Amino acid sequence: MKIRNQKRRRILMRASELEIIKDHTEEIAKKINEQFELEKDSIKEQLLEEIRGYITPVPKHYEWTRGYCPYDDSGEIYVDGLVSMDQTIADFLENEFTGQRRATFISHQGFDYETYGDQISYLLKEIKENIVQKTVKKYVEELFGEEISEDDLFRIFEEYYSEIYAESIAFDFDFYGDAVKFTGIQNMKLYELVEK
């Protein structure tokens, strides 16, 4: 009985600590924003390096056409030369197809054709999650004066991720256009990347 009570007290203590964190979600979001600002140059370099990899060598340019299937509106893409290096990074990410497709599992819309913006979203998600996790972990450890486990971090995210996330720049990193604007590279021309 004594062991069971000790476990119960410990769980209740953690629950009370979680309640304390609830009062700090705005401050945590501010710290995340500060961390994004501190890492802005690093994020910019990571994005430029990733995009440089996409365009070296110059990839094929694809055009979309409706296609001939009356039951499927996803259409088809076909090669139409090479990607223009005289377009902005924002235009490249939004308009250029990688040549890859994925099933949509939507009736009459069999496939979705991946753009470079879709592709860079994987890197942006990794960057975002890394910054959010290390910032929240650091803040909570300073708040309680001790290290927290990965399980505790998971519990914090389980309870308060949406509050922390929605109030921070991390939310913008779900949309590659916003993330690219944050770093200020949206208007750079592709040819500027290969000249470096």
Image (spheres, rainbow, N blue to C red):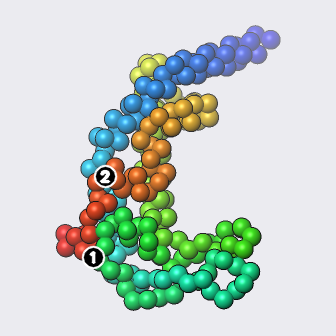
Q: Residue furthest right?
A: 1
Q: Which mark is residue 86?
A: 1
Q: Identify the residue shown where x is 56% and y is 35%.
A: 161
Spatial distance from mark 1 to mark 2, Cα to Cα?
A: 20 Å
User: Up-down: is 152 above or below 193?
Assistant: above
Give the SS element for disc 2. Answer: helix
What residue occupies the far left of the structure in this picture? Answer: 196
Residue 68 at what x, y percent from top left?
A: 66, 89
Give the residue drawn at x 49%, y 59%: 122
Q: Give the camera-side residue of 192 and 158.
A: 192
Quarter of the rendering occupied by the N terminus: top right
Image location (x, y in percent) of residue 164? 50, 33
Q: Is residue 145 left or right of residue 87?
A: right
Q: Is residue 46 above or below residue 36?
A: below
Q: Is 179 placed above or below 16 here?
A: below
Q: Nearer the viewer, residue 170 or 71?
A: 71
Q: Which residue is mark 2?
A: 183
Instruction: Characterize the local packing of mark 2: few (<14), some (14-19) or many (20 or more) Cα atoms within 10 angstroms.
Output: some
Residue 192 x, y percent position in the rendering: 22, 70
Q: Residue furthest top?
A: 2
Residue type for callout 2: Thr
Q: Which of the 4 image quarters holds residue 81?
A: bottom left
Can residue 43 be seen by looking at this rendering?
A: no
Three-letter amino acid code at the position of disc 1: Asp
Q: Residues within 10 Å of mark 1 (few under 14, many from 20)?
A: few
Choose the circle earlier in sequence order: 1 or 2: 1
> Residue 108: horizontal and vertical position, in percent?
72, 74
Taking 40 as reference, is 67 left or right? right
In the image, 19 versus 146, the foreground residue is 19
Label 1 element class:
loop
Quadrant assignment for the C terminus: bottom left
